[in-house]
Amino acid sequence: MVLNDQMRGYQTVLRSVYLQKKEKKTRKHRKNGYMRLSRNGMESKQIWRWAIGGVGRSMSTKKKLDHSQKTPMGGGGGVRGILLDSSAILSSDTLHTGADYLLRKLRYSNIPTGLLYAVDLTEAKVVSLLEKLAHEYSLERFVYNPSCMDDTVNAVSLAWKNNGATILHVVSNDNEGLVPKSLNSDWINVVVNVDGDGTSKNLSGIVIEKLEELPLTICELNRKCSEDNVVVGYIMKPSREEDFAKRGAFPLNPTENGLIFLPLTFDLPMLYQLKKVDIVIHKATDEISSIERSNSCDHSGNIIYTTRMLELQRYIGELPDCCVIDPFDNIFPVVDRLKVQEILLGLANLKTESRHKIRGAYFLQVDNFEDVQFEQRLHEAKLSLPSIVKPQVACGVAEAHSMAIVFKAVDFLGLSVPLPAVVQEYVDHSSTLFKMYVLGEKVFYAVKNSTPNADILKNSSEKNGSKPLLFDSLKSLPIDGSKMKEQPDLDIELVTGAATYLRRVLDLTIFGFDVVIQEGTRDHVIVDVNYLPSFKEVPNEIVIPAFWDAIRMKYRLRKGVRV
């Protein structure tokens, strides 16, 4: 199905579409910025379109995901608030080990978190630090009088709505003499052994040795609320984790479909943590040390992960019931651009009713640019100039994104793109790139400005002696800065068919691929495939629940549960 003429008129830079598999009766309407389309008189897949700056409200005014007032799946219980006594996170004006880690995890946990300190605290430096922490990590502040702790308990209970869940009062063993001996039934003391002497006078609460243990404690309490709750352990580099977390993707409180997200850390015994989770989601490509080339058909052995990731793999191997999204061996094809190109050749067998076709770009694998038959090989691979040259290794190592657009055959000699490399067809595509995001059986796309057509690039390169255009695709992609041209029609049937094919062949749950539409032929050409993309162009309130659904669906399939 091709989007109709009405859709072309929207002056937007970014758009996203949610393709849902359920079939609906024929209808077309707009509501709150979404449009649902179907063919007249025919059933079709449900299509949701979000136009930023076009139809509806902008993302900045859309309602954010909010689970702070929701009870866990299966009813009440769980944790409704976390009150951190100042003694638990700092000594004098110095943060305890693990305090920064804990505050970062709690900031986007969807659990109200407060900072508690004494009214008679007189050290200006300490007060200033507490205020800074409260501002930086969005903490509520509560001041208590040691002789009237009951008043503090009542004040916090009123501030955080009672939904049958528990408030955790986190205090150091140095300061536990100040906590009330008898709390309301919905309060639990958590004593942190900050001085490491292993002693605690607390008899009714929970004792932990490190601040890093608190998310695990919260997770275990929340899990007890319902037997349907499932714990998802996640691990990725801090910047990526924060990007997901600030969008509400990793709540410690159960999601609507019963997922609880637990950050995995190498500061605690990994095997112990893995025994507490049902699912592990990772971005293993963040932890690649090197990639070795091999002629073996078993590509997975070529990835050399960091020591930490190897440790994680080893422990997961000891837990056969642990569901991994996605298995490490399934990641390799998206790390190897040559392997991806070979997989895309299978699109030729895709059966559709479309007048157009979807394919991978024409390509040639190169080990040596000095090959005397190099130009002949380019011709045989249906490659003309300009062509784009990419390292064969797609991610995880230095220079994986160092690329070049080459205009003359002689300029391949001495080209500073790491070898082995893949020479790829440069497609004239009206400077428009469609970023496709696949989450389980759901597919989204966003439209972005892209590189100019070949004639514009050639004119620009002539000013520089037609030398190759070198760039880092993560930083300095040569984008056409002119006004966005009329957007080419995306053939929904083609891209959803390709998504289904790639999901089956790659056996991945969450991945993305980039599509350009060739001028003239209208071929839909896939130019890149990647694992666990950010899908940041799609509004949170749409894509995050889809992210959770994809994880839950994978778990059910892994366990053989009917869905």
Image (cartoon, grey):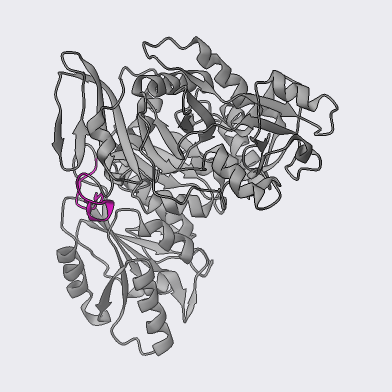
Start-end of magenta stretch: 55-72
Residue that appears at 69% across and 25% down: 364
Left or right relative to 516: residue 312: right
> 406 and 141: which one is in front?
406
Q: Main secondary structure of the magenta part?
A: loop
**Residue 32 position in % (x across, y down):** 16, 43
Q: In the image, what residue occupies the spot 34% across and 72% down?
A: 135
- Residue 332 among those drawn in magenta: no
Is residue 54 something one can see in this rendering? Answer: yes
Q: Considering only vertical position in the picture, is 453 above or below 332? A: below
What is the x, y in percent for residue 326? 50, 31
Query: Which quadrant is the C terminus positioned in?
Result: top left
> Up-down: is 201 above or below 514?
below
Residue sitting at x 23%, y 65%: 182
Residue at image coords 47%, 32%:
516
Residue 277 as seen in the image, left or right of residue 310: left
Is residue 144 rendered to the left or right of residue 102? left
Q: Where's the N terminus, which quadrant?
A: top left
